[in-house]
Image (cartoon, helix red, strand yellow):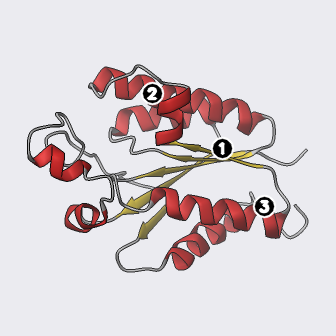
Amino acid sequence: MQKGFTLWFTGLSGAGKTTVSQMVAKMIREKYNRNVEILDGDVVRTNLSKGLGFSKEDRDTNILRIAFVASLLTRNGVATITAAISPYRNIRSRAREMIGNFVEIYVDCPLEVCEKRDVKGLYARARAGEIKAFTGIDDPYEPPENPEVSIKTHEESPEECAGKVINKLIEMGYLTDNN
């Protein structure tokens, strides 16, 4: 059985987590012939965490649910990718402990750029006071202190960012040409 792992993409809304994670998933499927599952924050909230709000407790519950599913997939040899804001370091640390084969990817993008990319208008609504406790506006985002990979989506193309992730997986032994 192939060795499972979880790529944990974290960053502000609009930073590029979904874009890069989908590109990485495609590369892993096509070049390494691996089973890949993406646990995208928006999709998980719709299906697994429906009814949760955005209080710290609800956010933590959502992330722990994602981590639980990721741990099951990882231990069964699946290349698992999560793309959720996951703003708090302590809960990401708990996710790392639950999962084991964990690769944290910090999608580093300035707030101003994320706001310009915001197709859903969430930042504007948060700034207008319509959305409370919005990460980056009136709720904190705690960047990772020592991520395995840091990508700057405002300076690098999605392809360059995905390539950095793939190279780290090769370096860590999760991907090889005979996978």
Q: Amino acid at mark 1?
A: Asn
- Give the x, y percent position of residue 107: 41, 61
Tally of numbered discs: 3
Q: Note whether 64 is above or below 119 in the view shown.
A: above
Q: Tell me where residue 81 appears, x and y as whole percent.
A: 61, 49
Checking the image for residue 29, the label placed there is 3
Q: Which residue is mark 1?
A: 101
Report the front residue among 177 and 130: 130
Q: Quadrant location of residue 147?
A: bottom left
Residue 73 picture quarter: top right
Q: Nearer the viewer, mark 3 or mark 1?
A: 3
Residue 31 vs 93, above or below: the answer is below
Looking at the rendered image, the quarter that the N terminus falls into is top right
The answer to whether 151 appears left or right of 39 in the picture is: left
Query: Which image quarter holds the C terminus?
Result: bottom right
Above or below, comparing residue 126 to residue 169 in the picture: above
Tag 3: residue type?
Arg
Q: Earlier in the sequence, mark 1 or mark 2?
A: 2
Residue beneath the point at 40% across and 71% down: 153
> Are circles 3 and 1 on residues that touch, CB within 8 Å?
no
> Measured along the vertical axis of the image, is residue 51 above or below residue 166?
above
Amino acid under disc 2: Asn
Q: Which residue is mark 2?
A: 62
Q: What residue lies at 49% left-to-right and 26% top-to-bottom?
A: 64
* Residue at the outermost left position: 128
In the image: residue 24, left or right of residue 94: right
Local SS, label 3: helix
